[in-house]
Amino acid sequence: MRRGRVGLIGLLAAAGGLYGLWRSQHTLSSLKFVSPPAESLSQDLSPAVTGGLTESAAAPLGLAPSDEAAMTEFKAHFAAGDYGKTLEIAERQLGQADLDKGYLAWVRSQLGVVLTCQAWVLIKSGHCDEALPLLSRALRAEAIPEATKGLAICTMKSGLIDDAEKHFEAYLAREPKDREVRLIYSDLLESQGRFTEAAAMLQALLTEAGLPEGPGRTALDQRLKSMLARDRESGRQLLHATESYRLLYRAGEHESLVPAVTDALDQVLEEFRNQWGLTLPRAPIEVALYPNAGFTDLVAYGPRWASALYDGRIRVPVTQEFIAGRNVEALVRILRHEMFHGFVAEQVDRRQLPPWFNEGVAQQVECPDGCSFPGFPPIPGNFFAAADFMRPFTNLDKAHAEQIYKQSLYMVRVLGAWPGIENPIRSVLENLNQSTPLDADGILRPLGITFNQLRDRSADLWNSRFRP
Ligand SMILES: [Zn+2]
């Protein structure tokens, strides 16, 4: 099976899981600039910025003891990586009349770097809103490329595409070799419908020296192939845009489906907010309907058994059956399923949720009034181990994927009926935000139960053929 997670330059984060076969699916690659600041961005960024401080830290000579003490305090917090505290100290010291003018000038010269470092701490924990004012202040103090990079990423995440583009261009003019940012920028270009340019950028990344054979290269290659296919398709696409989503579909083929699709999207948006307590994403969710033939070229990184996916955008193949107006409720189920992935991804800042939960709830919400699920009551046995539910399902073959999807839904239904807890699923969803721990037990913490408890109880019920 294909790789579910595309770890290109550490920046591409898997967006979710799959769901298969006879209906939707989701996940994969794409740019999760949004998600993974943790490894990638931090490693790239912090040393560079920290270096800035050290360099200009050749502070004034001959300081009085009180100035020395002030500088020691400043540097100690900075060296410890506590940039928020360093900023507080800098601001306090700048208001102290007893400190030497030369020393205070040095403090002012460090402000841009400290602000940028603190902004990146916030970006990495999903708090772009708080980072933005710091980045603007940093840039007023000093032209620091990392501050521009932060602005580019945060404005893009807020859906301010035109602003983001300005910042990306400014940053890349100074740092033209930053592969990570060029990759993210190619995603912005896709959002703008500039597929040819996006493909050219990916092509350049691929042909440059220095990218070894391996998963990263394969992922980039698949991304380029997909982008070229989208470029060809784009000439035939029309756009239906609302405040909450942007729907692309093929002209001359999909028009008859647009009313049903927009009704389904409008309804599910309302339902997610009201019934499930989810937050409306800051930027419109992008939804693309594609012809069924050639779908696998448009998402070359998707598993073959996926019948739709969410990779930062919802991508759905449209069959002739749907176009003929038959079984449109299946299309609606796919859309609702993928919309859940899109909604919840934004709520956790596109970090990876435990696959069992992401796929289980996505199936649970597929039908407006609940679905009847095939295969329940279950055939006893073969309940997956706890660790299997935490790994991306994208690597599984079709048969195992089908089984683990079913068991994920089963666990969500067992959770939803957990004795003594009111609205367990809604409680978990409401608690999800950009800083919620997304490990096995993290999302269940508000309920006071552990993942192993849930998994074991589910396995017992499964084996007793209980119908949740
Ligand atoms: Zn799914």
Image (cartoon, helix red, strand yellow):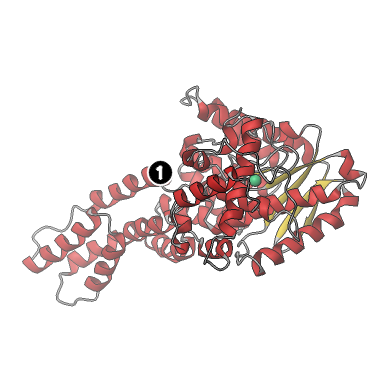
Closest to the observer: 180 or 323? Answer: 323
Closest to the observer: 366 or 290? Answer: 366
* Disc 1 CB within 8 Å of nearest ligand 1 atom: no
> Which quadrant, please, contains the N terminus?
top right
Occupied quadrant, residue 104 = bottom left
- Relative to residue 315, is residue 213 drawn left or right? left
User: Which residue is at a point 20% across and 62% down the rendered structure image?
Assistant: 74
Observer able to see residue 15: yes
Q: Residue most toward the top?
A: 213
Q: Residue 234 placed where, x, y %? A: 77, 41
Q: Which three-letter amino acid code belongs to the residue tagged 1?
A: Glu
Closest to the observer: 440 or 317? Answer: 440
Q: Residue 407 placed where, x, y %? A: 60, 44
**Mark 1 secondary-structure assignment:** loop
User: Which residue is at a point 58% across and 42% down the rendered structure image?
Assistant: 463
Q: Residue 264 placed where, x, y %? A: 78, 58
Q: Which residue is mark 1?
A: 39
- Relative to residue 99, is residue 55 drawn left or right? right
Occupied quadrant, residue 139 = bottom left
Tell how many labels.
Answer: 1
User: Which residue is at a point 24% across and 48% down the rendered structure image?
Assistant: 55
Observer able to see residue 238: no
